Amino acid sequence: MADLRNRVFLVTGATHSIGEYIARGLHAAGAAVMITGIEDDKGRAVAETLGARATYRHLDIRSDEEIDARLAETVSVFGRLDGIVNCACSYLDNGIATARADWLAALDVNVVGAAILTQKAVAYLPKPGGVVVNIGSVAGKFGNGFRGPYSVGKAGLMHFTRLAAVALGPQGIRVVTVSPGWTWSPPMEGMTANNRDLADRAGADVTPLGRVGRMEEVANVVAFACSDEASWVNGCDLPVDGGFSMMGPDQGLGPRHWCNQHAGEFAVDAGQPNPK
Ligand SMILES: NC(=O)c1ccc[n+]([C@@H]2O[C@H](COP(=O)([O-])OP(=O)(O)OC[C@H]3O[C@@H](n4cnc5c(N)ncnc54)[C@H](O)[C@@H]3O)[C@@H](O)[C@H]2O)c1
């Protein structure tokens, strides 16, 4: 396990789901965590269950004033700030038909808020030693017929990681993306009527490891990325997706498999399918 004793991290969107697990993972590794978000009751409850070394504060990452106040408060409460984790996201999205106001609103959370928090955190982060972790997604890596600002935001955030790594590297601040694949979490619980077997069955179709991910698995990689064990990891994306992003659209089955699917329609023998 990563050793984050005597380190302090601020996590956005940490009131539930993956953000909560990230905060819990950092805390379990010994860090103090400033849990932030916009769901105050849930955030306070998370901080209470963690007890010492955890505090909740409201932080809407669209607000420069709140960002300034929470960064300063983190240092006054815990004495230092070693890193931030940009986990907050907006799923506001109507695909290609998304209206301008919704594009701007979603990108304000998914890219701009993370960029401004990073920019403002630099004044507090240790140089060298500061860390910024941006939570990406497989959604930011591939074309997707029904998504707009969410996917574009994730792709933008991954590129922000690259440019921030180059800009801040000379000061000894590392910036990385951690990109989950399909993860068993409240959004997936909602779309499966809370049926984990269904989620794993669907995940198996698109993921070499044959299931959906667990929130702890994302949190473990974030804790690693925040630790000194990752001291030479900078600017890159760490996928936590069971191999999802390594597989092409043919699901690794090759053209013979797909020709076989349609061979009957053309009265053609496409030969033996590839062994699975
Ligand atoms: N669930 C998945 O399968 C999955 C897959 C890939 C990536 N991710 C990423 O993981 C992260 C967490 O996603 P999740 O699925 O747990 O979603 P979620 O909606 O449960 O979490 C997003 C969090 O961001 C918060 N938030 C929204 N607007 C905010 C604002 N203006 N200021 C501060 N906080 C705000 C929400 O309150 C929520 O706590 C996101 O960055 C998401 O893109 C999730």
Image (cartoon, rainbow, N blue to C red):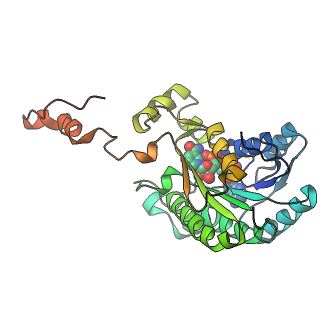
Count the marks: how many?
0
Q: Position of residue 224 (x, y in %)?
A: 67, 47
Q: As rendered, which of 237 and 210 lies closer to the eye?
A: 237
**Quadrant housing residue 160:** bottom right
Side of 93 relative to 263 (left or right): right
* Quarter in which the N terminus is drawn: top right
Q: As rendered, which of 25 and 203 lies closer to the eye?
A: 25
Q: In percent of the image, x 41 and y 39: which residue is there?
A: 206
Judged from this view, the residue extending furthest toward the left is 267
**Quadrant housing residue 162:** bottom right
Side of 205 relative to 212 (left or right): left
Side of 126 relative to 108 (left or right): right
Q: As rendered, which of 99 and 247 lies closer to the eye?
A: 247
Q: Position of residue 17 (x, y in %)?
A: 68, 42
* Quarter in which the C terminus is drawn: top left
Task: State whether residue 48 is above or below residue 152.
Answer: above
Task: State whether residue 195 is above or below residue 79.
Answer: above
Q: In percent of the image, x 84 and y 62: which residue is there?
A: 70
Q: Position of residue 219 (x, y in %)?
A: 67, 43
Q: In percent of the image, x 72 and y 43: which residue is there?
A: 2
Task: State whether residue 130 is above or below residue 275.
Answer: below
Q: Position of residue 273 (x, y in %)?
A: 21, 31
Q: In percent of the image, x 52 and y 35: which residue is there?
A: 212
Q: As rendered, which of 229 and 53 lies closer to the eye?
A: 229
